[in-house]
Amino acid sequence: MSTLFEVDAPAAPAAAGPRPGLRVAGLDISLTGTGVATLGGTTRVPTKGRRRDSLLERHARMKHIADTVLTEVGHVDLACVEGPIAYSTPGGSTWDRGGLWWRIVSGLLERDIPVAVIPPTSRAKYATGSGASRKAAVLESAQRRYGAILESDDEADALILRAMGMEWLGTPLAEVPDGHRAALAGCQWPDREAVTAR
């Protein structure tokens, strides 16, 4: 699937090591279950909606998700969010997904938190070596590589996003093959100094 944004040139980990203790969050933003991964672990923010929900109900749902996610993230040095996917037939839920994504990303930027945007295919490639891998394969890989007990693929995706941010900063959570690491080149990374100088 194609993403809605241009990607930067390949980014390599910093030559000189970053300062210790950099805090990185991974966010798999979703209306039904947003996954969040931080230094403290992973969690999921589940909600349910109906097609007949009113505008006020949809707004309240998105506000609840965004407020909860931003509270879980707190103040970090880098937030890695899964990028939006291009949809050919926009509908109510498509607009809501986009609105939620921007609501959370805006909340991060308003806190002066640098944001990296990771395409879904890059997240899958970093986890498994294949950008076409399904969520179940990403979940299995995340549990095996990081020794994590994860209750959902949303949490697995968030953990992989966080791991990608740590790798980009030169402090990987675990060793990954070069072919997996190549996924970093397809992402939108913020200015490195804006992250390491915080």
Image: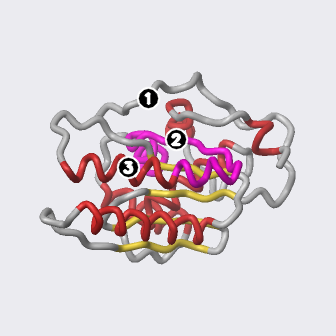
Question: Quick check: 114 left or right of 107?
Answer: right
State the residue at coordinates (37%, 71%). 152
Using a 10 Å C-alpha cutoff, classify the residue at mark 2 as few (fewer than 14 neighbours), some (14 to 19) or many (20 or more).
many
- The residue tagged 2 is 117
Is residue 41 in the magenta section?
no
* Vertical comparison of 89 with 38: above or below: above
Tell me the number on the disc at residue 99: 3
> How far is disc 3 from disc 2 in space, using C-alphas?
16 Å
> How far is disc 2 from disc 1 in space, using C-alphas?
9 Å
Q: Amino acid at mark 3?
A: Gly
**Which x, y percent locates residue 155?**
44, 67
Tell me the number on the disc at residue 5: 1
Q: Amino acid at mark 1?
A: Phe
Tell me the number on the disc at residue 33: none
Name the main secondary structure of what is drawn in magenta. Answer: helix
Choose between 58 and 91: the one closer to the eye. 58
Q: Which residues are magenta?
A: 105-129
Instruction: Look at discs 3 and 2 and give the one toward the viewer.
Output: 3
Q: In the figure, residue 139 lies in which quadrant?
A: bottom left
**Colour option used:** secondary structure
Q: Earlier in the sequence, mark 3 or mark 2?
A: 3
Is the C-beta separation of discs 2 and 1 under 8 Å? yes
